[in-house]
Image (tube, helix red, strand yellow):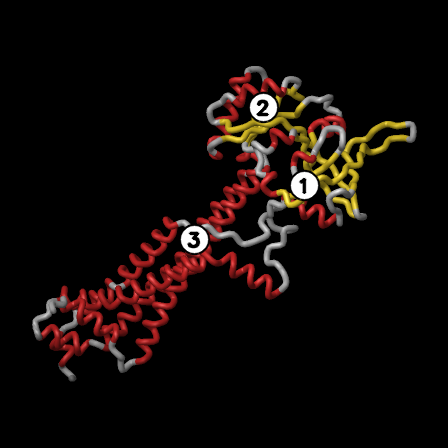
Amino acid sequence: MFKPLSFYVGLRYTAAKRRNHFISFISLTSMIGLMLGIAVLIIVLSVMNGFDRELKQRILGMVPHAVIQGDGLLDDWQQVDDVVSEHPSVVAAAPFIQGQGMVTGGGNVRGVAINGILPEQERSVSIIENHMIEGKLDDLHAGEFGIIVGKTLASSLRLQVGDRLTVVLPEASVTPAGVLPRLKRFTIKGIFSVGAELDGNYTLVHMDDASKLMRTNGKAQGVRLLVDDLFKAPKVAEEAARDLGGRHYVSDWTRTHGNLFQAIRMEKTMIGLLLMFIVAVAAFNIVSTLVMVVTDKTADIAILRTMGATPGRIMRIFIVQGAVIGVLGTIVGTTLGVLGATYISDIIGWIEAVRGSKFLNADVYFISYLPSQLRWEDVYIISGAGMAMSLLATIYPAWRASRVDPAEALRYE
């Protein structure tokens, strides 16, 4: 059976039990380092992708993609809603009233965002209905002063569905008893959980109740839009505002939450570069391994040269030997990385269950669990880069082997 000499000898050198066990140890550590570097890089980038996906789905599913507001309150928000809904890129639109306040209950006080909505329209622009763990949006009825709160907020106030809490606005009302803060008692109609910080500071009430509480006289503060392409939200909002005419102001998620996603993108890039240096260090350990192998095999190289082996063939022998280390390390590392990225959430969940505590507390972090999203383009880039650096690391030792002088090498043999 035909076997190319360079390939055959290179494999023999790789598989042979060397007299110098230190060289074998260095080869093994080079392979393990390359394997771990690639696996860790795939897992870390997958976790970063998972955080990016979850933040977009959860936070941007709750907050507006874009908002159109007038010069003050909107007297004709129904007309605004109808006009912007005709834009081909607008999936849905819904009016809102928003304010800041505090809620008190169970002896605790928390600052919250109070959002007045129309339940029948809110479900078309928000994912909130998919994350209700108790109650539903339709439980909010005008005049009943019901409120829907997040799971974290309900837990901190020690409240359940049916309990009552007090909403306090940062505005004063003049009464015969003096200047008092404006407050109103609400009944909890539902609890949601999106697994982000919104669980602790986001509340929903019926827009008619919010209008009475904030004294907007039935007018909306603005209309929020759900667009078909998240990254076209600024352009779509501006086009919709032009269709309305008059003085209208637009805002979008890139202004309210854009810094968060830019930070995640930059962090992913920097972490990827830093971990790629680890892969590079592991790959270039192959240089030291092959240099020592060349020194150890000087006599063998000289004999091959005297038997007619060309410098190019000698060079290919050691390229094959280094490539075997790089290929095996890359394949095993990629396999471990893919498996780790696929099951990292389950592994962390199991560790949390054993320890009895969570790594990501919802009171502190946006996401209360470790998400992961494996992207095959990242896997191809990482494994390709690891393979390329491994092959590049073999060039100098292989070239050095091809320059061995047979007469000089065999002089003292």
Q: Which SS class for mark 2?
A: strand
Say left or right for 268 vs 164.
left
Say left or right for 2 vs 99.
left
Disc 3 residue type?
Answer: Gly
Q: Residue 256: percent from the left, percent from the top?
A: 58, 36
Give the mark count.
3
Disc 2 residue type?
Answer: Tyr
Q: Which residue is mark 3?
A: 272
Q: Residue at coordinates 80% horizontally, 34% vertically from top-left?
A: 184
As measured in the structure, the alpha-carbon distance from the residue carrying label 2 to the one carrying label 3 is: 39 Å
Q: Quadrant of the C terminus?
A: bottom left
Q: Which residue is mark 1?
A: 135
Q: Residue at coordinates 71% horizontally, 35% vertically from top-left?
A: 100
- Closer mark to the observer between disc 3 and disc 1: 1
Answer above or below: position of 299 versus 43. Answer: below
Answer above or below: position of 198 versus 411. Answer: above
Q: Which residue is mark 2?
A: 249
Q: Which SS class for mark 3?
A: helix
- Comparing 240 with 352, the one in front is 352
- Closer mark to the observer between disc 2 and disc 1: 1
Disc 1 residue type?
Answer: Gly
Say left or right for 112 vs 292.
right
Q: Residue 122: percent from the left, percent from the top?
A: 61, 32
Q: Quadrant of residue 250?
A: top right
